Image: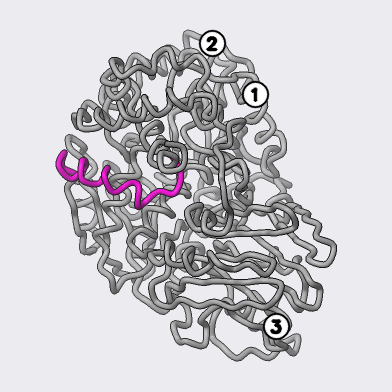
Amino acid sequence: MCGIIGITGGKHRGLKEGMGLMHHRGPDNLGSWSNSSVAFGHCRLSIIDVSSSSNQPFVSGNGKAHIVFNGEIYNYRELRDLLKIRGVSLKTQGDTEALLEGYLNEGVDFFKRLRGMWAFAIYDESQQKLILSRDHFGIKPLYYSYHSGILAFASELRAIQTLVENLNPHTAAYHLFWNLGYFPEPYTCYEEVWSLRPSEVVVLDLEKSSLSNFMLTMLENFQREESITDEDEAVKSIELALNSSIEAHYVADVPVGLLLSGGTDSSLISALSSAQGRRPATFHISIKDSSDTAYAKSIARLLGLNLEIAHLTPQLLEEWVTKLPNILDGPTADLSVIPTSLVFSLVPKSMKVILSGDGGDEFFGGYLHHPFLNGRRLSHDHAAALLFGSLVKNQSLFALQYINPAINRLRRYWNLFDKDDLAHAYLIHSRIIDYPLKLKETLKFINDAIEHHPLKKILPVSLIPDIALYLPGDILSKVDRASMNSSIEARPPFVDQEVMRAVAKIDPRFIVSAEWQGKLILKKILERYLPYELAHRDKKGFGFSTAQYGLEFLLPDTMKAIKFHAQYAEQFDLGGILEILTPEKAAILVRKYPRFALALITNWYVFSKTQG
């Protein structure tokens, strides 16, 4: 895991400053290289081949290509063997060289062979091209700006600001942020800066000063030729793929630990790791009034794992809110960024890699809205039975683990059955405040994302919006910022193309059914390693609510953020929502819509210096 930065043309003034702003991403080595056409900078967190021979920017054996690379290629040993068979001479033991020499040997098609997470830039001197690439699911971030023939890129928005002057709010994209709570790719909060989409390749022809882009993904080749319809076979298939992925994600020349929340996803990674003979250190954040900690302790004890626990107290919560300007480089409405950042801060400096359970919900139908989005043709009576049954079974399901109050959540899910349009139903669930801004434009964006996703015809349709938008735009982005703030590489074994290939081969009813049986197939696997009551626990979100923590300490910043946005309402596309944005209503926002309050606060953090 690293930080990369670069710019074309002869003006490289901001490069070192940008590297300094990303020092937390790679404190082990800072390196730079430039010629008259391109300048590269790299902050290295040494994980594979920790010797100086793999420091970056890295130059190819023929001296004709350079690379800066953020991420890990888990199948790099197989790729190295392939290149050696083809007569390619390799001088290091790392994945960076395999990636660069593979490109020179096979071109951009070599990227389809990669298993891992990545964001990289390659300067091909012989072709006079600069090539940017991002992994299949958007695990690693990469931003770029192109103006007047000059291309600048970086791993973080704050770093790209050192290369591109006079960045302005992307007014036309803010309706997406105010509705969803994050900027979905390719948008960012800046009009002049774009995010590479998952699987996207951007190519700058330096001779012609022309920029092009295309999608290069292996996901479009996944087929559901003959679905696995037997449940036992499906369980075996997914378990085999997860074991393979977990084994691959342990590839490192440094110690690897994992997060253990006590939920299904992290518990399964812990159980399969233990079954492979591993005893990783595990880390947990304890949230007030949550049963997760008791589950995590029981699981760690049964698996013989050491568990380190930090408690999220109101005082600690308030302290970490003040750290958000240093953790984030863009606005967010995701309150869980706070406990996520805190748990990564527990990890000792000697441990640079942590496995997380991210992606399990998105790939295996773990969210409460998945069965409802998938079964919108159910009768209202059946829907009501499911909704009220869930509420009675676990009264804390809505109020405690999900941010909105129970009645508001219940109303939202009931409304799903009145919407024939999947995007509309999804937005009802997803939006952060009950005031849909530019509804038509937002729905079109969501529908387009669903329609053009390569897995649309293979997976249950209810999964596609989360995989296409929420996973890269919110979850993976949040975890990247939170982990890198503590110089930790977070690896999500669920977010793996071989796992997705296995999911694509099983009958969709094993993923999302009309009945609420979220992640049933994962729980079936977990049964083999843990007692039934630990394997089959109800869904718990990783977050907290105003019911658990008084968030009154957010009021001063909320009031400041409201005043700021009232002053610059046009730039941030707030429209009629200003009617409720008054300092007098700040307490209502914090209590009823804490995600929207956080969105205002963090957007104020980002832009107050440039706008105010």
Quadrant of the rendered structure where residue 583 is?
top left
Residue ID at (57%, 52%): 165
Viewer-proximal residue, 173 or 341?
173
Q: Position of residue 585 (x, y in %)?
A: 30, 16
Which is in the foreground here, disc 2 or disc 1?
A: 1
Q: How dense is the environment of label 2, judged by Cα within 10 Å: few (below 14), some, or many (20 and up)?
A: few
Q: Position of residue 486 (x, y in %)?
A: 32, 61
Q: Label 1 belongs to which residue?
A: 441
Residue ID at (53%, 34%): 512
Q: Is residue 335 left or right of residue 38?
A: left
Could you tell me the amino acid type at mark 1?
Glu
Could you tell me the amino acid type at mark 2?
Ser
Q: Earlier in the sequence, mark 3 or mark 2?
A: 3
In the picture, the quarter occupied by the C terminus is top left
Residue ID at (38%, 67%): 353
Q: Is residue 581 left or right of residue 145?
A: left
| Image: 82 above or below 501 | below
The dot on residue 83 is 3
Q: Earlier in the sequence, mark 2 or mark 1?
A: 2
Q: Label 2 belongs to which residue?
A: 379
Q: Secondary structure under badge 2? A: loop
Q: Earlier in the sequence, mark 3 or mark 1?
A: 3
Q: Is residue 386 visible?
A: yes
Is 564 inside the magenta-drawn segment?
Answer: no
| Image: 259 above or below 85 | above
Q: How dense is the environment of label 3, judged by Cα within 10 Å: few (below 14), some, or many (20 and up)?
A: some
Region rendered in magenta: 312-331
Q: Is residue 363 visible?
A: no
Is 314 inside the magenta-drawn segment?
Answer: yes
Q: Is residue 507 left or right of residue 512?
A: right
- Distance (Cα) linking label 3 and label 2: 58 Å
Quadrant of the rendered structure where residue 579 is?
top left
